[in-house]
Amino acid sequence: MLRTLKTITFVYAPQEDRIAAAINAGGPDAWSCWLTRRLALAVLERATEYLANTSDLAQRAPARSAQRRDCVRARSGHRQDRSGDVADAA
């Protein structure tokens, strides 16, 4: 059965260093899970490619959007290694 996605809520819990994700919170079809730092980074890394391959809107976006994203990442002062871990740039 396909359920309707009504709300997505993310709350960062610093003491856990995790993000609580709640889908349709408060409803009869509510669902939630924890996203660890490693999982969140892996999802974000793969989201761009997934959207580029599945979203009509993303496919119509100009190539400059990808360049802008890479520029923002470079200016953030962080680097990402092959394992997906993020560290401060030296």
Image (spheres, rainbow, N blue to C red):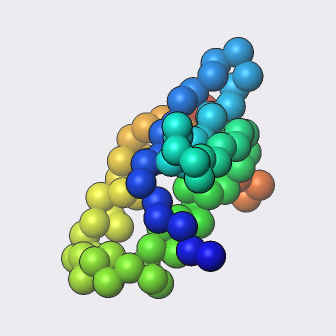
Instruction: Kindly give the residue lying farthest to the top in the view shown.
Output: 15
**Residue 30 in the image: x percent, y percent?**
59, 47
- Compared across the picture, whether 60 is left or right of 78 comes to left
User: Does residue 66 lie above or below 33 as drawn?
Assistant: below
Q: Residue at x 52, y 44 (%)?
A: 27
> Residue 33: horizontal and vertical position, in percent?
70, 43
Q: Quadrant of residue 35?
A: top right
Would residue 32 be found to the left or right of residue 67 on screen?
A: right
In front of the other: 51 or 75? 51
Quick check: 24 above or below 45? above
Quick check: 39 above or below 5? above
Between 15 and 83, which is closer to the camera in this rendering? 15
Q: Residue furthest front?
A: 28
Q: Nearer the viewer, residue 3 or 77?
A: 3
Where does residue 12 sit, x and y in percent of width and height? Answer: 57, 27
| Residue 90 visible in the shown view | no
Left-right relation of 32 to 74: right
Q: Is residue 7 visible?
A: yes
